Image: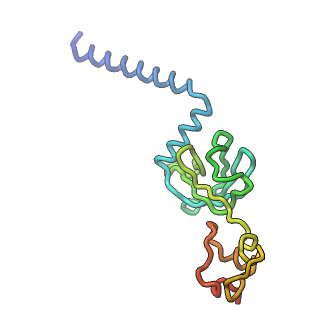
Amino acid sequence: MPLSVITGIACMVGGISLLATWRALRSRLTPERREQRRRLDLNVNGRLGDALLTECDEDTLYYTYEVRGVHYTASQDISSLREQLPGTPDQLGGMVNLKYAAQNPANSILICEDWSGLRVAPRNAGASSPAANGAPSTNSAPLTNSAALANSNGIGHQAQDPTLAQGS
């Protein structure tokens, strides 16, 4: 038998054994470990986007987002990521960041071990103002709660000029 045929057969046997070893090791991964790998892969290779957090349970986040004109509704199990949350689930809400796979936009995450797109919702602006605590207000035109919340950008920043926040 020629040497090239023996070398070819040896390469095929080596490749098949390598593939069998890879499959055996891959099948040993628990579902939790596979999910962690998926999240970490999306964190490294995913694209950023915006999502609307619609509902928060103790262990699940429900959200909607749009990629290239297609609307997606998804959820993420956060039972293993509770310590990564920026607050309690009832404090989360509104617009958040997500990462999704460019080849499969339905594959997305809001939070993983190394990254979080979640934000804590701003507190009621009227409850934290000096006037609400009995202190005199320094603004010439006081803001109403609805005007202050409507002017909020979701992170808690307010307009620099209070006259801009007043309704017409």
Q: Vertical placement of 120 versus 28: above or below?
A: below
Left or right for 104, reference 80 = left
Q: Farthest front residue?
A: 135
In the depicted view, which residue is nearer to us: 135 or 86? 135
Identified at 55% across, 40% down, the residue is: 38
Quadrant where the C terminus lies?
A: bottom right
Q: Vertical placement of 89 versus 19: above or below?
A: below
Query: Based on the displayed image, in which of its 4 quarters is residue 32 positioned?
Result: top right
Residue 81: x and y, percent? 63, 43
Colouring: rainbow
Query: Based on the displayed image, in which of its 4 quarters is residue 35 positioned?
Result: top right
Residue 2: x and y, percent? 21, 12
Left or right for 123, reference 97 = right
Residue 47: x and y, percent? 49, 54
Q: Vertical placement of 61 versus 25: above or below?
A: below
Identified at 41% across, 18% down, the residue is: 17
Identified at 65% across, 46% down, the residue is: 76
In the depicted view, which residue is nearer to us: 17 or 4? 17
Left or right for 56, reference 42 = right
Residue 71 visible in the snapshot: no
